[in-house]
């Protein structure tokens, strides 16, 4: 492949591949050693056990061995959005605005300061997915809660400011334009071909095999055909489901195993790159749609979004999805 | 303002303001001293005079004093896209792809290695805008050239790899989904209210004044009501024009003066932050549209786009547009 441009089938967005710049997958390996020699417990860290007075009141907790806990959920102490107020729009001159209604929670993934998901036993990752699911179900009960987004920022380049392993949930009082655009593109596909475009992709990727990293009973992980960044990875349930709330118990276990394995390979093969992951799930009232399909998207932070990407919405990816997948697949 | 969410009137995108995190504009000032003690000439730099053998053949050059040059345009040596080939789509399984047709040029903004636009005499900035304009006119002649994007990456955090002052032009063989979404939102506004939404904003901002940084005869610079990042600044021609090719000679001079002044204030007041700027101009065949209006968008790189922004398309801005504008306006 030389200088190809590919379309994301689900969203109609294009990605430019520029492998002529000559990078091999291993060239993306970080030379910097990060997150080494972290203490198991940091007395200054608000997420470490014993420092609860630095935290807002705990929302929920998963019990662990010896009276401890495996993970817990707290409100974000410096929230971007607040549950007080409402999502009514008002006019400011010709513009629209609203108060900062929403929710912003933190999921502390472990009592230990120095672990990451890649290191955890799969059973603990499954408990984390279980916690995500419980919060997702609970937060979708609010009629004002139009979008629930679960995400994880790993490392400073990915936007985190705290080392202690944690994910975040933000709930917004509106469905953003970007999500509507993507819904519309997927719906247009469904209306034309009568099928969920993500189910179509899963079938093709399983058959083709070139971009698949791993697969288990209910879950598949592949580098998407139009990956926007090197080593971008999607984890999808094979069964059609628009909303993350629809995940079954068996699927939670399989998703946990796949997630742990993919993150371990990224850590081992690329020297622990910073990354974001996002659970892309249907907006409120869309969980029954036949054209939407939730997926967990991992985006390593190995490239910089510059003026062209900002202005055009097109990504330039210096790597190649097939090569990235082969690299992550190999023992 | 506390915890407000605002809509970009032109694109319908929302931005969350989180000033509760307590930053004042001056807190964004970089503490790092970058780009100091640069040489006027670097023998290793392909853009410095005398190193032409490191460059592809020059496309155009603006003559300068004493037989020298003011700025010049060259093909990018490591292009993301190439003028060979075509933009025909082909199928790969269920997906669409095309060869990497397009153009990728570099505008070397000065023979001097150590200047930036903020330092240049306005007459030289005007010559740079003139060069942008000449290339834009020339590149729009190709019927396959669907989008021409002129942009500038200032500093490593903004994605540049070379210090020598330069801008870039990328031409693509397709109109990306993101540009179509924005066109449609602006067209919907026009169809509803019978007026260009950007002209509407210019009128309101001039009357309101809170977000205006400066204004001259034909050009206005303001922090948009729904700025996505701290100190985001838009420079617009006050006269309605969809495409940058429509800029008049008088407007070039005014745009150059405004651009030089805004960049000088960013440099002086925030200690030379990295930034991207982009000329957002109508796609091919859209230059007559009454609902589009080109603008030059400056985005300082003071924040990190994390999982929430990637997944939702919503930006979280820790600053406030009115405060940012007052800070940039003050002497």
Image: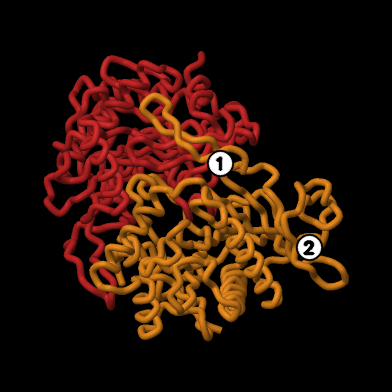
Chain colours: A orange, B red
Give above or below for A201 relative to B274.
below
Residue found 40% across the figure and 34% down from its top: B298
Which residue in the protein does label 1 denote? A101
Disc 1, SS? loop
Residue found 83% across the figure and 58% down from its top: A49
Is the N terminus of chain A in the top left, top right, bottom left or bottom right quadrant? bottom left
**Sequence-wise, which precedes: disc 2 or disc 1?**
1
Asked whether, in this view, residue A59 is left or right of residue B45, the answer is right
Is the C terminus of chain A in the top left, top right, bottom left or bottom right quadrant? bottom right
Q: Quadrant of residue A206?
A: bottom left
Residue found 20% across the figure and 71% down from its top: B90
Q: Which mark is residue A111?
A: 2
Please give the chain letter of the residue carrying mark 2: A
- Residue A191 versus residue A112: which sits nearer the camera? A191
Image coordinates of residue A145 in percent, x first then y, are: 53, 51
Q: Can residue B70 be seen in this view?
A: no
């Amino acid at each position: 492949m030389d200088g190809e441009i590919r379309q994301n089938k689900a969203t109609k967005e294009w990605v430019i591949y520029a492998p002529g710049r000559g990078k091999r997958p291993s060239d993306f390996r970080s030379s910097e050693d990060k997150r080494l020699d972290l203490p198991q417990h940091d007395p200054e860290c608000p997420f470490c056990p014993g420092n609860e007075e630095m935290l807002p009141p705990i929302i929920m907790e998963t019990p662990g061995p010896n009276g401890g806990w495996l993970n817990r959920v707290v409100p974000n102490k410096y929230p971007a959005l607040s549950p007080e107020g409402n999502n009514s729009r008002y006019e400011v001159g010709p513009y629209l605005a609203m108060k900062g209604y929403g929710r912003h929670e933190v999921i502390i993934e472990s009592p230990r300061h120095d672990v990451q998901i890649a290191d955890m036993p799969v059973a603990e990752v499954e408990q984390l997915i279980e916690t995500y699911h419980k919060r997702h179900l609970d937060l979708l009960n609010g009629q004002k809660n139009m979008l629930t987004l679960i995400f994880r920022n790993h490392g400073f380049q990915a936007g985190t400011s705290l080392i202690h392993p944690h994910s975040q949930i933000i709930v917004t009082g509106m469905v953003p334009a970007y999500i509507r655009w993507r819904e519309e593109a997927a719906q247009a596909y469904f209306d034309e071909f009568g099928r969920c475009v993500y189910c179509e992709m899963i079938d093709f990727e399983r058959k083709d095999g070139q971009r698949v990293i791993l697969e288990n009973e209910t879950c598949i992980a592949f580098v998407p055909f139009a990956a926007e960044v090197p080593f971008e990875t999607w984890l999808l349930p094979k069964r059609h489901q628009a909303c993350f709330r629809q995940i079954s118990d068996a699927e939670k276990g399989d998703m946990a195993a796949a997630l742990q394995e993919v993150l371990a390979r990224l850590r081992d093969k690329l020297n622990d790159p910073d990354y974001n992951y996002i659970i892309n799930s249907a907006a409120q009232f869309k969980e029954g749609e036949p054209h939407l399909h939730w997926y967990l998207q991992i985006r390593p932070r190995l490239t910089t979004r510059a003026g062209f990407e900002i202005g055009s919405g097109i990504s330039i990816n210096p790597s190649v999805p097939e090569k990235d997948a082969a690299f992550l697949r190999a023992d």
